Image (cartoon, helix red, strand yellow):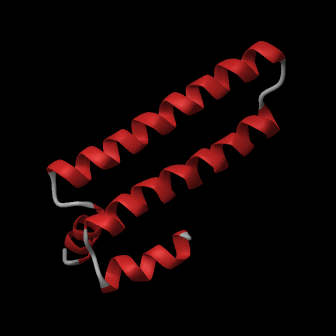
Amino acid sequence: LLLGLLPAAYLCPGPAVDYSLAAALTLHGHWGLGQVITDYVHGDVPIKVANTGLYVLSALTFAGLCHFNYHDVGICKAVAMLWSL
């Protein structure tokens, strides 16, 4: 899904693509960091703490990206502005 959203973000940027990117990027990061926790954190209590921290981080990331999409230019336009530098 994320690979399909990248050309869509370039060809037809808009709010639907911005929010889809926010969800896909957050989910991608959540799954990746979840695997890091699985591989490197051992013990019942540390795993629970790490997973709780991961859920908090993922929720804050998604909320921040949604806030950026709603109150600023959005992810697609921000990347385009960055490329224009």
| Quarter the C terminus occupies | bottom left
Residue placed furthest toward the front: 16
**Residue 45 figure quarter:** top right
How many marks on residues?
0
| Quarter the N terminus occupies | bottom right
Residue located 56% across and 31% down the image: 55
Q: Is residue 77 above or below residue 84?
A: above
Horizontal side of residue 11 vs 39, given as left or right? left
Horizontal side of residue 65 vs 1, given as left or right? left
Horizontal side of residue 26 vs 18, given as left or right? right
Residue located 51% across and 78% down the image: 4
* Residue 27 x/y as whole percent: 55, 51
Q: Nearer the viewer, residue 54 or 85?
A: 54
* Residue 47 x/y as whole percent: 75, 23
Residue located 35% across and 76% down the image: 9
Residue located 46% across and 54% down the image: 23
Residue placed furthest toward the right: 43
**Residue 14 figure quarter:** bottom left
* Residue 15 x/y as whole percent: 26, 65
